Amino acid sequence: MVSINEIDPLTGVIRPQGGPLYLQLKRWIEARVAAGDIRPGDALPSERDLAQRVEVSRVTVRKAVQQLVREGLLVQRHGSGTYVADRPSRVEQSLSQLTSFTEDMARRGLTVRSEILERGLHTPSVEETMVLGLSPGEKVARIWRLRLSDDMPLAIERAALAALVLPDPAAISGSLYAALEKTGQRPVRAIQRIRAGNLDAVDAALLNTPVGQAALYIERIAYLPSGKPIEFTRSVYRGDTYDFVAELRVEETPR
């Protein structure tokens, strides 16, 4: 398969040799995006136009495009067309400071908002009971939120606190830590565990990424000055947007 006609607004097509036609077309689109010839936000020709110009069937074009959509390189907008997906800029978060998502984004001058996934009082799970040290019969306040910056989903936070600490979770509309600070119950230290994983269908849909894409899973247990655990949060961060940074020092040897 050789060069085909020019694809407006792109330049000439030379499909890579070998493999099914849809994979040849897929690899060509990937190469042009990587080279910067097709940029984030650029629209691809229509399925019919692309098929005619590359001289393949519309089924072949559809299969190549659908695979690139699943992999996150392209996005399809109903009634509008197919576009190269925006590449999110990466966010660095320090592992040496205990801050909320809202505070962390504000320091970078980024606009942040939340979509509530779940918010209310519940019977605690066994794990929540153990981590938070709840007494029999105590309720747990859960606040599960999708965190977005400039309308791009960045993270899913699933926080749990004792109902005695947060009796009205519906009142939380902004920073959880700011609300806890007003009642004198803001945590002062935390233990975080971070692991890499792949997104399942539920979280991938919330984060608007393909199923199986890399993600960072973070479990945080935060404590009051007294040492009492006050917050148990499990978060999922998009792996293509976040870098966690820690400063390491060599401990001085006594002389």
Image (cartoon, rainbow, N blue to C red):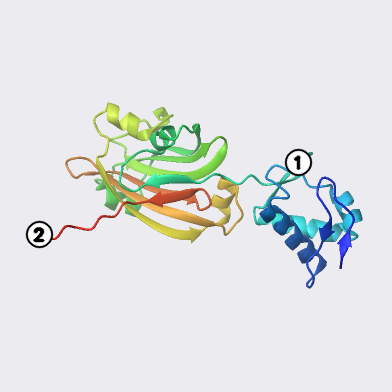
Residue density around tag 1, few if under 14, some if 14–19, many if 20 or more, within 10 Å: few
Q: Position of residue 166 (x, y in %)?
A: 32, 34
| Pointer 2 residue | 254
Q: Tell whether 189 sits left or right of 87.
A: left
Q: Residue at x 69, y 50 (%)?
A: 36
Q: Secondary structure at mark 2?
A: loop
The reply to whether dot 2 and dot 1 touch (C-beta < 8 Å) is no
Question: Which quadrant does the N terminus fall into?
Answer: bottom right
Spatial separation of the CA atoms under disc 2 and disc 1: 66 Å
- In the image, residue 235 sits, relative to residue 186, either above or below, namely below
**In the rendered image, which quarter is residue 12 located in?**
bottom right
Q: Position of residue 200 (x, y in %)?
A: 55, 57
Q: Is residue 204 visible?
A: yes
On residue 78, the disc is: 1
- In the image, residue 211 sits, relative to residue 80, either above or below, namely below
Q: Position of residue 180 (x, y in %)?
A: 30, 32
> Which sits in the foreground, 111 or 17?
17
> Which sits in the foreground, 242 or 189?
242
> Which sits in the foreground, 249 or 142?
249
Q: Amino acid at mark 1?
A: His
Question: Which quadrant does the C terminus fall into?
Answer: bottom left
- Name the outermost residue toward the front: 255
Q: Tell whether 204 sits left or right of 163.
A: right
Q: Position of residue 57 (x, y in %)?
A: 89, 60
Q: Amino acid at mark 2?
A: Pro
Q: Residue at x 56, y 57 (%)?
A: 213
